[in-house]
Amino acid sequence: MSSMKLHFLDARGALTDLHDWLHQCLTETYQKAAGLMPLQPLDVVVQTGKRIIPEKGHLGYAPLLSQCHLALISSAN
């Protein structure tokens, strides 16, 4: 069975209030995808950033097969 691990880069606490919500949403999405296709284990790195899509408030990319980075806009940025 595949698994997903979340890693929050949140030393300043900008995402602290969103940890539970993000964990729930990303876990549900991963489980839905796993029900449709075979998935490899995945590390998801979540952080705030300035290089995001302004209209969306986030940006994601996958530099490796087993890794996905998600940058979110923060009011602290």
Image (cartoon, rainbow, N blue to C red):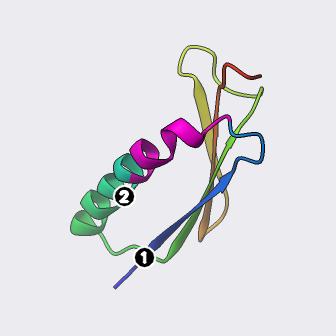
Do the CB atoms of the residues marked 2 and 1 lie less than 8 Å apart? no
Residue 26 placement (x, y as % from top left): 41, 52
Q: Residue most toward the bottom?
A: 1
In the visual, does 31 lie left or right of 54?
left
Check residue 27 in the rendering and tell me which mark sits there, or answer none: 2
Q: Position of residue 9 (x, y in %)?
A: 72, 51
**Mark before the other along the chain sequence, 2 or 1:** 1
Residue visible at 56% across and 14% down in the picture: 55
Where is residue 67? Give x, y as percent: 62, 64
Tell me which residue sits at (46%, 77%) in the image. Answer: 40
Q: Is residue 58 above or below residue 5?
A: above
In the picture, which quadrant includes the C terminus? Answer: top right
Q: Amino acid at mark 2?
A: Thr
Q: Amino acid at mark 1?
A: Ser
**Stretch of the chain drawn in magenta:** 14-23
| Residue density around tag 2, few if under 14, some if 14–19, many if 20 or more, within 10 Å | some
Q: Is 32 on the left or on the right of 64, as rendered?
A: left
